[in-house]
Image (spheres, grey):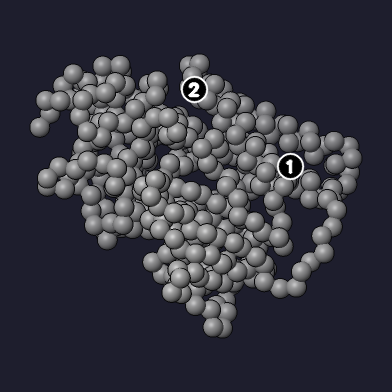
Amino acid sequence: MSDERIVSGQAWNDFCDNLRSAGNVVLSGPSDPLSRAEGFRYLTRLVRAGLEVFVEANDPLAPRLMRVVHETVKMGADNPDNFYQNACISGRYRYRITGRRNSVHYLGLATQIGHYGQGRGMPPTGHLDAGELVLDADGRFEIELACERPEGAKNWLPMTPETGTLIVRQTRLDPQTEVLAELHIERVGEPVARTALSAAQMDAGLTSAGTLVAGAAMIFQGWASGFAAQHPNRLPRFDQALSNAFGGVPDIAYYHSYWQLAEDEALVIDAVPPPCDHWNFQLNNHWMESLDYRFHRIHLNGKTARYREDGSLRVVVAHADPGVPNWIETVHHGFGTMCWRWVKPADLDGAPEPRCRVVKLADVKGLP
């Protein structure tokens, strides 16, 4: 079947049809030139990510950690504080991760069912963060990935037979001083002889890449449109079960929503951080891509924000600098999505909702 699809070109035609469907998703979103331009750029980024993951690195027998989401490939409200890595794995095999902890603030590893190219959720099958790791005197560690805990394993990251993806998140609150963890993954077992590319592999790779592009575009456009219709300029709690199903971290409280401001308006967000490991707020475009944090101040975290004496803080989203602390730039956007995260709060279910209100930009300095 795959031989026929590759030889006839049907596999390629189906891939192109998926891209055309993704283009229609962009056309169903906002119609202003900036949103359309970012929407089509978003699709090119997803194509790049999909081909890299599913054509070049889709072998669970020879996994490698790679950056799929980064400064110029973004999806699902990617966190600018995070250094993301993914690897293709399978619950049919065992793996070992070796590395050194170093000084990065947060290190979390998760195994999940399936992968992004299947067009459905990715429920978790295991989670391990640095606070649970057993380290040697030099900060080094070994983590065993298996469906059952191997005898003698100091660190175990569970899988199930359906596991298909490893996701690593490293969070730097201060990239200038924190050193990322060093990580290497290998399959445990006898080496397997490498073979030439097969038609079945190429067919599956094109199918998964095309599904990623069309599926991610459809899912996050749907979420963004729902946020805009249901709770603009507010930050209600996002459904934890839905977050977990789509790759979110189980011990993070997420607040996804939509923002929309006129040139003379500002979104004022007041919050009192609960006891938690750290927190983050970011501004995104309509396609749930973080705005360009390489050149603009579009996010804050628990270390970069300025606090009041009582431990509370105020974040101000505005088109121009209002002359107060914690200003977030809109980068020439009039609307988009946004996300607040409380990471590992002491009371996950009772984590507080940040309070939002829209005021005139000229009035921000005078607010109590």
Residue annotated with mark 1: 206
Q: Residue at x 75, y 73 (%)?
A: 190
The quarter of the displayed image where residue 217 is located = top right
Task: Report the front residue among 155 and 246.
Answer: 155
| Residue 129 image offset from top left, x and y in percent | 43, 63
Q: Do we see residue 29 in this rendering?
A: yes
Q: How many marks?
A: 2
Task: Identify the residue at the far bottom of this view.
Answer: 151
| Residue 216 image offset from top left, x and y in percent | 56, 39
Left or right of 328: which side holds 213?
A: right
Q: Residue at x 60, y 34 (%)?
A: 45
Q: CA distance from mark 2 to mark 1?
A: 27 Å
Task: State whether residue 45 is above or below residue 58.
Answer: above
Q: Do we see residue 291 in this rendering?
A: no
Disc 1 residue type? Leu
| Residue 75 image offset from top left, x and y in percent | 51, 39
**For marks 2 and 1 on the same chain, the one whose residue lies earlier in the sequence:** 2
Task: Report the front residue among 335 and 180.
Answer: 180
Task: State whether residue 7 is above or below residue 102.
Answer: above
Element type where label 1 sits in the image: helix
Task: Report the front residue among 93 and 105.
Answer: 105
Q: Residue at x 21, y 25 (%)?
A: 323
Circle 2/circle 1 CB separation < 8 Å: no
| Residue 346 image offset from top left, x and y in percent | 27, 61
Left or right of 61: which side holds 185?
A: left
The quarter of the displayed image where residue 337 is located = top left
Left or right of 198: which side holds 40?
A: left
Image quadrant for the C terminus?
top left
Residue annotated with mark 2: 35
